[in-house]
Amino acid sequence: MGPQENEEKLMMKDLETVLYTEEQILARIRNMGEQLTAEYRGKFPLLVGVLKGAVMFMSDLVKRMAIPLEIDFIAISSYGTSTRSSGVVRILKDLDQDVDGRHVLIVEDIVDTGLTLAYLRDVLVRRNAASVKIAALFDKPGRRQVPIEPDYCGFTVPNAFIVGYGLDYAERYRNLPDVGILKENVYRGSDTPRT
Ligand code: 5GP
Ligand code: MG
Ligand code: MG
């Protein structure tokens, strides 16, 4: 066993359960890409990835969309305590592209309370996008605080804190190829991870 393999095994040990393997995730993204190709043909969409969690999803998704498109990224942070989001969102890094008249697809890792996406969607609508839709790899509908649903969703997940494939806990585990539920003892002592 090489050192790299060993490190990955160590990260895997922090998971309670693996929910989706890399293969399952890529198979689902392939389907989503085909569906989005049909939906956005002739529309030259602008895909807006929400940093940093959506980086892996964006990268694999656009490779499965066989149409001309553009990608851009936005970084946002929500105010609030470590366990409760306030719904007030701050833009840390804005888009480079003008969204006026564009068909925008927000690419997000996971929809939880929905507060971040509700804010972001409003910002893009106010900037005069021709359309604003949401593609989320994961959806946790049981935790929603505002009525917002992804237009395209990869998987529905239970009310647990998940990591891997872009999703972090304290900036770690983003590079884990599979997605799973983080063991509670990993964050014992600190608050239940919010985001
Ligand atoms: P919101 O509560 O505003 O819908 O979620 C905002 C962000 O919180 C998500 O885009 C994601 O980055 C993060 N988040 C929500 N649930 C989880 C989770 O289970 N695991 C991880 N790692 N991040 C999450
Ligand atoms: Mg996110
Ligand atoms: Mg995070």
Image (spheres, helix red, strand yellow):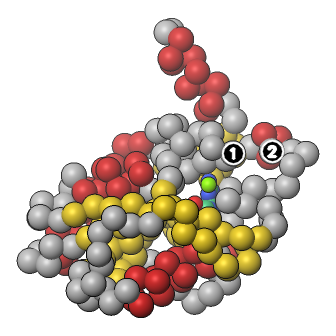
Is 182 drawn above or below residue 45 in the view shown? above
Q: Is residue 162 visible?
A: yes
Distance of label 2 from label 1 (alpha carbons): 9 Å
Residue 100 position in % (x across, y down): 27, 84
Quarter of image, res 9: top right
Amino acid type at mark 1: Ala
Q: Which mark is residue 170?
A: 1
Q: Nearer the viewer, residue 26 or 145?
A: 145
Q: Is residue 25 visible?
A: no
Residue 36 located left or right of residue 120: left
In-image side of 128 versus 116 (left or right): left
User: Which marked residue is nearer to the observer: mark 2 or mark 1?
Assistant: 1
Disc 1 element:
loop
- Label annotation for residue 59: none
Residue at image coords 77%, 70%: 80
User: Looking at the picture, which amino acid does disc 2 mark?
Assistant: Tyr
Q: Position of residue 183 (x, y in %)?
A: 74, 43
State the mark number for residue 187: 2
